[in-house]
């Protein structure tokens, strides 16, 4: 079976959509640009599903091991023999899985936006940006070359920038888009340098070759990269840490997470697609892509684990205090990505020890469903209420039954209640951490309780609690808005039953992931406690939340302020970078460098001023000079020159 | 004639030269400056004539030179006065310091 | 392919412009002339590929050589390699766009267009010269029109800027001349006479002491054109005072004369000195890159932003040249082309905004996307290209420079590469700041609501430049193949020199 003919179409169809809608959307297909986008993406989704079927069930396996196949490869930019940026498509379990997730969620978001963005003036532009994002994300997941991933990495960054700033006349949206881009750019700097190191040491940019060379303990590249060191740390650790910084920036890991909550300024379907299901997991995907290399380097894996762990816990605590529903979801996303990260961090290369890897990918997969569902529900709610604030909501279950039900399913899933998808994936993560690292396990368990609490806090505050005044005739929205919710909710219910270890594992072989009933008691208990606590506090309007908040005092307040991370960053950028670097640089340029140039010009002018004073233009003056000169000569000749 | 020593005449011509020089330096009026220049030229003329008469009485070179200078002085006066008249027409003044447009 | 056409057409157009009456005739003639140049440069590229695929491996193609002034051994010797063709393409793009954006130049239009075309003669001549003297001649030819363009049609403190620019560039060419003369008198063609011919000098081995003496003259001289730190201060003032088309020419073409000169004359002819001085070049260009970027961050005038960012971006050109690897030099040339197109687009766009709003201060702009979608989109595209977004040319060029720089093993080179890399973050900050303030946000003044979007000429100009940028950004391999052999031959010279030593 020849893949190449159609696989390239999967990313190229959205690209065509971007070009078509971007150039002509505004003029020619003002009303039906959404339909065009949806149909192109539908074709892409079908192709992706077909590819997945082909890969997983027909010809992906050789000797029971999933192969990494590169059906398309084209040299894009040749640097020197051996190193070149190639545009290629790699098919292996994670890329195929991601391809399905991206196209599917994107399709749902496309459909949802049809109703949500209906009245928008820049409807065509919106769809063209969505298509651009889908194209870039697909390019990212199928990248066969580390520089290709960087290229699409930047492209998803810019499409995220464009979409966050979609409501460009709001200063807050502009600021948020800028923040998102700059923070991730900063992280990308690390990624870029990491790539340069890996490329230099490995002598190639191609993923497969790179991985093969750097994991083969006999190869010269392996020896040189592990023995060479910089500041006492081996170059490999440096490279992987730098690459991980790139991933952490995109995936909103502490301390580079500050852009994610602000990114919620974008249209809500965009948040569902980019800032929940796909782009933010790119960091996890990157680590997974380079996992064979990571797995031979303990120290970089530790960094991944602890950063993931800390982010998961921190975000969960903050999420409990936020009042903007999208921000709660944003922090919850950050927390769940933290889960995926530390699951990767505790995994190892082979067999049973690779459970974390499978679990992480599994969680990525299920998370995409329930988190995009949560965001789309939030979109529907915001569409109805015209506010993001929890206090403007309450008792909405009567007005929006479909949203209510699907939201509940998603909440149960993320809280880890069986039999919804989140339960299974979280279970595996906890199991993996239990075997690898007990401290991480305990924190993860606690975090999962917190997750259940803040999700149900959200759920009860929105759908129960005291009904608020709503103007106009509240209605749930068009069919195009309900349809994706139902589909995603179905996905959330069934996705957990996929035997994920059969398809995705760290070494490509089948990994049996048995279900341990005893083990799952603790997490479910934690989750139930969280839910009950939320029920007690938020089911009916009361002053209980307030009392709890004041009892927690400083902790509550600093969590509400997101632990002052924004303020710290603001201090560093405004006070330090701007005032201590930018301003002096400007001052030096204006006064010292330019001043020297002007000084040279000025002194030249000054000297010429003196000289030209002699050239007075007065004949009498000249005559006087002339005459005194003669007298001088006479004196010299007569008296001195003897 | 013979009684007058050469030094007396040279003294007169030197005096004339410095009077001319003084006038040249101090006056701003162009006519006066022109007159001062004439004085200088005439002091030179006197020198030429005197040296010719006293030192090489048989020769005529000094006299010729004097006549030559007188002719040139006439032409020079004509040109100078033309310039002065033109300057007066354009500047309503013949003060040298008023014509400063071309200065640097 | 006769290269003389490249000079003849702009000269003829410029002459024809002198006989035209009124803006309409002038601009039509200039437009046709520049379109012809554009077509010609494409034809040139086509023939070049044809020769190359036919297996012609000569370093320079389409050579033409005749004596200009025999006693001093000055020849009119022209020829092109891939690097020159890339620069010629860039020039013709920028000239075409520049003529189009000056479509409504009412004031002294004949003289304006004449000077623009005259400048292009200098640029073409410079890029095709293979004789140091003619090269210098054309370099000078390109300086004078700039002084007049800024002094007469400029804005702001134009006299000061015109004077500063002309004096600094003249100072640069004086240094270049000293270097060239020094080279000339140390050449030996075998029979005791000297030569200005680049090809011949490249074959000789100039004594290392001589190279070390004259390399700084040539490099700093050309470096002034190419905004070498600390001789870059003409760039912000000159660019911001110049009229739109002149800014485009200045940043798009003139600054590239410097980069090309550094490469073709300084590095190619004096390889030993280039190696010895490479550390200094790298340090200076790293300072220019990062410090230019930080200085840009503090600017409030859109033209100043772009001018300072040009300092930063041109630092990549000099960095690539200083790194002395094949990849880095290719990257430097790519960066020249990319920066030329991108900055011309940026200036064109700022000009469009200024024509309408009569201000370039960011604080007085805002929300332009709503009223001028085309201009704003172009501005965003130029900005994204400037911050090195993949898909646009800037990324390709910068990445090539980085990859080339990283090929060195020593920590010094790595650290300087990291410093240069760090600028991508700062670039993002100032570009997004400008975009956020001027393009997005609420409408700054209600009267802006009446402004019109771009006219056809502006659309064509911007469209052409964007096509250039995207063509490099999406399919960089063609430029890579075009430039690669040229960079290779320069590198050969350098490594040969290393062997002889």
Image: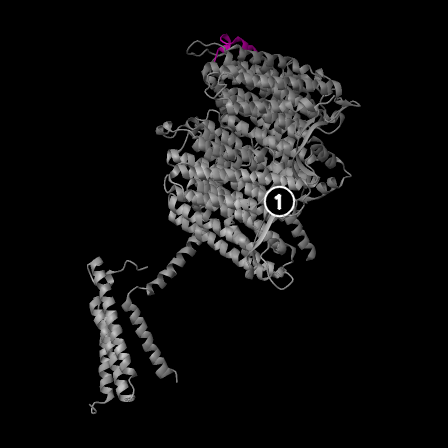
Asked if A311 appears above or below C60 in the picture, the reply is above
In depth, the one of A252 and A441 nearer the eye is: A252
A452 part of magenta stretch: no
Q: Please identify the quadrant where the C terminus of chain B is shown.
A: bottom left
Image mark count: 1
A400 part of magenta stretch: yes
Q: Which residue is mark 1?
A: C328
In depth, the one of A219 and C220 nearer the eye is: C220
Residue drawn at x 38%, y 61% is: A607
**Which x, y percent locates residue A513?**
73, 19
**Which x, y percent locates residue A526?**
62, 18
SS class, disc 1: helix
Q: Is residue C294 visible?
A: no
Predominant SS along the magenta part: helix
In depth, the one of C445 and C207 nearer the eye is: C207
Asked if C322 appears above or below A94 in the picture, the reply is below
In depth, the one of A522 and C164 nearer the eye is: C164
**Which x, y percent locates residue A220?**
75, 41
Asked if A267 appears above or below C477 in the picture, the reply is above
Residue C19 occupies quadrant: top left
Residue C48 occupies quadrant: top right
Q: Is residue A486 visible?
A: yes
Left or right: residue B64 compared with residue A519? left
Q: Residue furthest bottom?
A: B3
State the extent of the magenta-drawn residues as a range: A394-405
Residue B85 occupies quadrant: bottom left
For label 1, count other residues whose C-alpha is less than 10 Å away and answer few (under 14), some (14-19) or many (20+): many
User: On what subunit does the disc labeled 1 rest?
Assistant: C
């Amino acid at each position: 079976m020849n893949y190449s003919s159609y696989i390239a179409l999967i990313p190229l169809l959205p690209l065509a959509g971007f070009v078509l809608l971007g150039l002509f959307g505004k003029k020619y297909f003002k009303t039906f640009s959404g339909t065009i986008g949806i149909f192109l993406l539908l074709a892409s989704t079908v192709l992706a599903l077909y590819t997945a079927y082909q890969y997983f069930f027909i010809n992906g396996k050789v000797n029971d091991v999933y192969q990494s196949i590169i059906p398309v490869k084209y040299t894009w930019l040749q640097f020197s023999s051996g190193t070149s940026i190639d545009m290629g498509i790699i098919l292996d379990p994670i890329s195929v899985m991601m391809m399905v997730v991206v196209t599917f969620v994107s399709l749902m978001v496309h459909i949802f936006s049809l109703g949500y963005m209906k009245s928008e003036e820049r409807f065509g532009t919106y769809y063209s940006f969505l298509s651009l994002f889908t194209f870039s994300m697909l390019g990212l997941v199928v990248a066969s070359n580390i520089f290709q991933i960087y290229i699409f990495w930047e492209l998803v960054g810019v499409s995220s920038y464009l979409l966050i700033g979609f409501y460009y006349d709001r200063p807050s949206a502009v600021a948020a888009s800028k923040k998102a881009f700059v923070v991730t750019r900063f992280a990308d700097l690390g990624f870029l340098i990491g790539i340069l190191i890996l490329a230099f040491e490995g002598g190639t940019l191609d993923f497969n070759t790179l991985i093969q060379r750097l994991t083969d303990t006999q190869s010269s590249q392996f020896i040189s990269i592990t023995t060479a060191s910089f500041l006492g740390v081996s170059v490999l650790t440096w490279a992987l840490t730098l690459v991980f910084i790139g991933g952490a920036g995109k995936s909103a890991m502490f301390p580079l997470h500050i852009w994610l909550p602000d990114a919620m300024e974008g249209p809500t379907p965009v948040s569902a697609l980019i800032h929940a299901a796909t782009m933010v997991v790119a960091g996890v995907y990157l680590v997974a892509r380079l996992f064979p290399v990571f797995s031979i380097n303990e120290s970089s894996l530790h960094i991944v684990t602890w950063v993931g762990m800390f982010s998961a816990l921190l975000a969960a605590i903050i999420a409990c205090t936020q009042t903007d529903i999208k921000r709660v979801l944003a922090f919850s996303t950050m927390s769940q990505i933290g889960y995926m990260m530390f699951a990767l961090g505790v995994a190892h290369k082979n067999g049973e020890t690779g459970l974390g890897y499978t679990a992480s990918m599994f969680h990525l997969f299920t998370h995409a469903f329930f988190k995009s569902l949560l965001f789309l529900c939030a979109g529907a709610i915001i569409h109805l209420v015209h506010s993001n604030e929890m206090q403007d909501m309450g008792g909405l279950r009567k007005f929006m039954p479909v949203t209510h039900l699907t939201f509940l399913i998603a909440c149960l899933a993320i809280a880890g209640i069986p039999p919804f998808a989140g339960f299974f994936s979280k279970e595996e993560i906890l199991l993996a951490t239990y075997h690898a690292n007990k401290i991480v396990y305990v924190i993860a368990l606690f975090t999962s309780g917190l997750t259940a609490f803040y999700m149900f806090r959200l759920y009860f505050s929105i759908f129960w609690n005291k009904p608020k005044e709503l103007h106009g005739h509240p209605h749930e929205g068009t069919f195009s808005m309900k349809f994706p919710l139902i589909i995603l909710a179905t996905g959330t219910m069934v996705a957990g039953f996929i035997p994920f270890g059969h398809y995705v594992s760290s070494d490509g072989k089948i990994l049996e992931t048995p279900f341990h009933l005893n083990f799952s008691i603790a997490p479910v208990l934690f989750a139930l406690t969280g839910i009950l606590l939320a029920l007690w506090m938020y089911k009916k309007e009361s002053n209980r939340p307030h009392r709890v908040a004041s009892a927690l005092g400083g902790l509550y307040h600093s969590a509400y302020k997101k632990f002052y991370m924004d303020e710290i960053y603001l201090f560093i950028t405004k006070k330090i970078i701007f005032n201590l670097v930018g301003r002096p640089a400007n001052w030096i340029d204006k006064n010292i460098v330019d001043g020297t140039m002007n000084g040279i010009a000025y002194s030249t002018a000054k000297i010429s001023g003196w000289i030209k004073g002699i050239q007075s233009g007065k004949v009498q003056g000249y005559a006087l000079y002339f005459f005194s000169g003669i007298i001088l000569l006479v004196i010299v000749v007569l008296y001195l020159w003897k | 004639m013979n009684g007058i020593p050469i030094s007396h005449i040279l003294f007169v011509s030197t005096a004339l030269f410095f009077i001319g020089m003084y006038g040249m330096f101090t006056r701003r009026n162009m006519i006066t400056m022109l007159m001062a220049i004439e004085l200088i030229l005439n002091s030179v003329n006197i020198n030429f004539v005197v040296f010719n008469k006293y030192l090489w009485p048989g020769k005529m070179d000094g006299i010729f030179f004097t006549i030559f200078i007188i002719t040139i002085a006439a032409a020079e006066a004509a040109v100078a006065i033309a310039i002065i008249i033109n300057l007066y027409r354009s500047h309503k003044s013949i003060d040298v310091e008023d014509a400063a447009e071309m200065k640097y | 392919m006769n290269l003389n056409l490249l000079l003849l057409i702009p000269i003829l157009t410029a002459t024809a412009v002198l006989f035209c009456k009124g803006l309409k005739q002038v601009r039509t003639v200039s437009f046709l002339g520049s379109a012809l140049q554009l077509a010609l440069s494409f034809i040139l590229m086509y023939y070049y590929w044809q020769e190359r695929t036919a297996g012609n491996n000569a370093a320079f193609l389409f050579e033409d050589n005749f004596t200009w002034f025999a006693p001093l051994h000055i020849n009119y010797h022209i020829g092109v390699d891939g690097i020159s063709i890339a620069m010629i393409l860039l020039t013709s793009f920028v000239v075409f766009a520049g003529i189009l954006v000056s479509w409504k130049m009412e004031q002294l239009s004949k003289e304006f267009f004449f000077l623009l075309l005259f400048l292009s003669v200098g640029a073409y001549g410079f890029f095709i010269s293979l004789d140091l003297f003619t090269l210098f001649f054309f370099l000078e030819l390109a300086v004078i029109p700039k002084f007049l363009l800024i002094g007469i049609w400029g804005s702001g403190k134009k006299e000061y800027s015109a004077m500063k620019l002309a004096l600094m560039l003249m100072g640069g060419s004086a240094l270049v001349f000293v270097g060239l003369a020094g080279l000339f008198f140390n050449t030996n063609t075998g029979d005791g006479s000297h030569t200005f011919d680049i090809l011949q000098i490249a074959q000789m081995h100039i004594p290392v002491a001589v190279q070390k003496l004259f390399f700084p003259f040539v490099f700093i001289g050309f470096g002034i054109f190419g905004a070498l730190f600390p001789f870059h201060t003409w760039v912000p003032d000159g660019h911001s005072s110049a009229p739109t088309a002149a800014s485009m020419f200045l940043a798009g073409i003139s600054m590239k004369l410097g980069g090309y000169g550094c490469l073709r004359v300084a590095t190619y002819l004096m390889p030993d000195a280039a190696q010895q001085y490479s550390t200094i070049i790298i340090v200076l260009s790293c300072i220019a890159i990062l410090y230019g970027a930080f200085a840009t961050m503090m600017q409030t005038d859109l033209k100043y932003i772009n001018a300072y960012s040009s300092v930063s971006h041109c630092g990549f050109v000099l960095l690539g040249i200083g790194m002395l690897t094949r990849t880095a030099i290719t990257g430097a040339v790519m960066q020249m082309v990319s920066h030329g197109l991108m900055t011309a687009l940026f200036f064109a766009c700022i000009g469009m905004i200024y024509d309408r709003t009569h201000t370039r201060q960011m604080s007085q702009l805002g929300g332009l996307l709503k009223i001028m979608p085309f201009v704003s989109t172009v501005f965003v595209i130029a900005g994204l290209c400037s911050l090195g977004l993949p898909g646009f040319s800037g990324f390709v060029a910068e990445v090539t420079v980085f990859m080339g720089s990283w090929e060195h093993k020593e920590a010094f080179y790595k650290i300087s590469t990291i410093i240069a890399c760090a600028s991508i973050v700062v670039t993002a900050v100032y570009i997004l700041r400008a975009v956020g303030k001027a393009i997005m946000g609420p409408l700054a003044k209600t009267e802006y609501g009446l402004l019109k979007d771009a006219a056809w000429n502006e659309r064509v100009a911007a469209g052409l430049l964007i096509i250039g940028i995207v063509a490099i950004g999406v399919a960089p391999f063609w430029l890579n193949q075009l430039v690669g052999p040229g960079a290779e031959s320069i590198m050969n010279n350098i490594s040969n020199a290393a062997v002889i030593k």
